[in-house]
Image (spheres, rainbow, N blue to C red):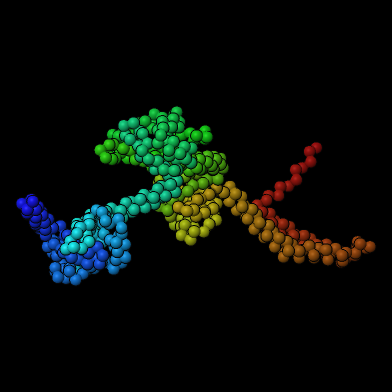
Amino acid sequence: MKPIIKKKVLFYDSSHADYKRLFEESPIPMWIYDNVTLRFIAVNAAAIGYYGYTNEEFLRMSIQDIRPNEDISTSVEIIKAPMLNNFYDSSKRRHLKKNGDVFYAQVYSHPVQFTGKVARVMLAMDINNKVLMEHKNTELNILVREQKSRLDEILSSVTEIIWSCKADDMQVLYINDSCLDVYGYTPEELMKDSKLLSAAIHNDDKNLVKKETSKVLLNGSAEYNFRIYHKDGSLKYLHTHAILKEHKGDAVINGITTDITQMFLAEEAMKEYSKKIEKIMESITDGFFAVNAKWEFTYINKASEILLNNKKEELIGKNIWENFPNAIGLKFHSELHAAFDSRTSVHFEDFIPELNRWIAVNAYPSKDGLSVYFRDINEDKEQRMKIEEQNKTLKEIAWIQSHKVRGPVANIIGLAQLFNYENPADPINKEIMDGIKVMTSNLDELIQEVVEITNISILPDKPNEA
């Protein structure tokens, strides 16, 4: 029996030595602590080197001293838990070095009898970089999710359709919520069945879209307008800008599509309105032209062609003062400049020697220049001048009547009242008749003066025919 006992003792000594060497020479920090008091009983060289405490310092400390203060309560609960009678993986725990550095460690422990005490052997592996990387990845993932959520909110709030599809088969990879308003289909419906997009294209525009798509594949981008039918049957006008990109080794087409229906209808209405205005402007007898800030003709109506004796094709885009240099210095030139500079309307008449006619002008400042209405008043002006001359003559005749004719007439009336009708042979009657004769002669001279003023020839009465 003794040899057998001795053999067992030798085996125990050998195993104990191997275990002790494995503990002390392990490159991983290890220690043994009292399961009741939590004080260190033994530590290996790796723990001393990594944590910075001496062996004596460790033996005066408990397991709580290598944990940050805010983690101590958690560590006590875990370490003293009944389940720790077996092998335990604590996952990641924060440990504290002597210099104050805090790091994450993966801790494993199992029960052991050591120097007659119930203890645990603990192994601590530094996983700080791994944990920090996990934290960083978590933060990045949160940031990515937040940015994606924010981007989704932005893309969902814009009225334009943002989309992406495969270049080979045009399968929709992404499309924002705006497609519902424009096409009447949800993003899920369009990504599930991409043919809905091509089916919505107006038949007359299918070849155009096909041609522009080929241009994207050939040149890398394209921009075009086309029409589609909404799910409810309404016609819509769209503008698309598409760009070819490479994504994860595959060619994709990214694009922005804008609903320009209202803008298109507004432009069409404006064109129709402009046609009506142009038709009106062409039908009026007054001349009308518009010039921009550079004094270049931008519009000329038909009446202007006649009055200016020039075709509109010869004047559009040309400078008014370069084409009519003789107008510089006239009232026409100064008044138009005054209207442009003061941004107020002007109304005036002027004689244009180059046209040899009088014109009446109304000029109104516009956003980009001047709008000018003018008409030929040559006949009106001549008629007014004749009327003015006639009025002058009438005024002169009235003056002669009131100042010269009135005297002889009054004298004749006075002499007639002195005539002795009861005795025609009265000698005074002869004097009265002589006076009337003189006054009548004076009156005749005045009448001749009036005739000369009015250029009226008084012809003698035609003799009576026998």
Residue 220 or 326: which is nearer the viewer?
A: 220
* Place of residue 331 in the rendered image (x, y in percent of width and height, measured from the top left): 49, 57
- 9 left or right of 255 in image: left
**Residue 132: quadrant of the picture:** bottom left
Residue 229 or 48: which is nearer the viewer?
A: 48
Residue 227 or 415: which is nearer the viewer?
A: 227
* Place of residue 434 in the rendered image (x, y in percent of width and height, measured from the top left): 81, 63
Residue shown at 64% from the left, 53% from the top: 387
Up the image or down, 116 lies above or below 154; here it is: below
Q: Is residue 414 among what the camera can see?
A: yes
Q: Is residue 321 among what the camera can see?
A: no
Where, quadrant-wise, is the C terminus in this rendering?
top right
Residue shown at 67% from the left, 60% from the top: 396
Residue shown at 26% from the left, 65% from the top: 36
Residue farthest to the front?
1
* Place of residue 421 in the rendered image (x, y in percent of width and height, measured from the top left): 91, 62
